[in-house]
Image (cartoon, rainbow, N blue to C red):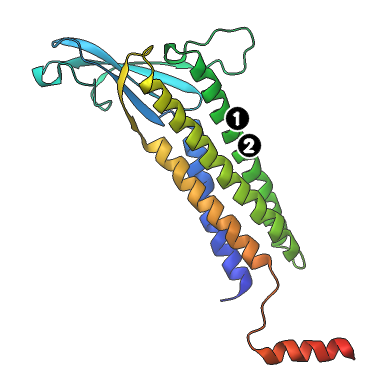
Amino acid sequence: MHKRTKVKITFFVILVGMASMFTAVVTDHWAVLSPRVEQVNATCEAAHFGLWRLCKKAIYVSEADYNGKGCGPISLPGAENCTYFKHFTPGDESEIFEVKTQKEYNISAAAIAIFSLAFMILGTLCLLCSFKKGNDYILKPAGMFFAFAGLCAIISVEVMRQSVKRMIESEDTIWIEYSYAWSFACACAGFCLLFLSGIGLLLLSMPRMPQNPWESCMDAEHEVE
């Protein structure tokens, strides 16, 4: 297969990875949290959140089997109220999940995700420039940018995972159950596609290895002449 064809296939995979990561960043279904159901024939408030927004949903519980268990599932009908996190507003107190330490986790995850988007933009610009004749050398920085974008994506995922774990283990919160949702899966998919595609571009940017020993010998003879 021709090198340029391989680059185009890799670019298509990169576009899928970029779409997955962008979807993860702008949506708010990274994790779902459930409090304990205290009484039947009443509403309980489950929540789902992302990097920028927390949505709480009032779910009506009518079955006795749910008493003492987690509220949900979040797909049940109910009134939903969403609020944006005040990440970068100095002087404001954050009420994220009633735990102040969660603000640092969410700020870190959001900031790292922004770095991932920035690396994706830089990688795309380099890759588009490499399509011009004689610009194959730009494949190497493009591959590095996409690999860095993938690494930032997985670091953001891990920070968010630690945030949820710390929140569930804390005695200061009402949440007893959690699950990761489709935005979280999109971020993981974005990491895999971007990182592997970045490594692929780095490999494609390397000089072609000789297919047999005679090619190396012939090149050496030309250099001597």
Relative to 187, is 179 on the left or the right? left
Relative to 121, is 182 on the left or the right? left
Residue found farthest to the left: 64
Residue at point 51% right, 24% down?
Answer: 52
Q: Compute the Cα span from label 1 to label 2.
A: 6 Å
Residue 40, compared with residue 12, is above or below; it is above
Residue found farthest to the right: 225
Residue at mark 1: 111
Q: Percent from the top left, x then y, of residue 178?
A: 32, 27
Q: Is mark 1 on a helix, strand or loop?
A: helix
Q: Percent from the top left, x then y, of residue 34?
A: 29, 21
Relative to 56, is 153 on the left or the right? right
Is the Cβ of the residue at disc 1 closer than 8 Å to that at disc 2?
Answer: yes
Residue 66, compared with residue 193, is above or below; it is above
Q: Residue 198 carries which label?
A: none
Quarter containing the C terminus: bottom right
Badge 1, how many Cα within 10 Å: few under 14, some, many 20+?
Answer: some
Q: Percent from the top left, x then y, of residue 48?
A: 37, 24
Residue at mark 2: 115
Quarter containing the N terminus: bottom right
Q: Is residue 16 at least partly visible in the picture? A: no
Q: Please name the amino acid that badge 2 sits on.
A: Phe
Q: Please name the amino acid that badge 1 sits on.
A: Ala
Residue 104, compared with residue 21, is above or below; it is above
Residue 131 appears in which quarter of the rendering? bottom right
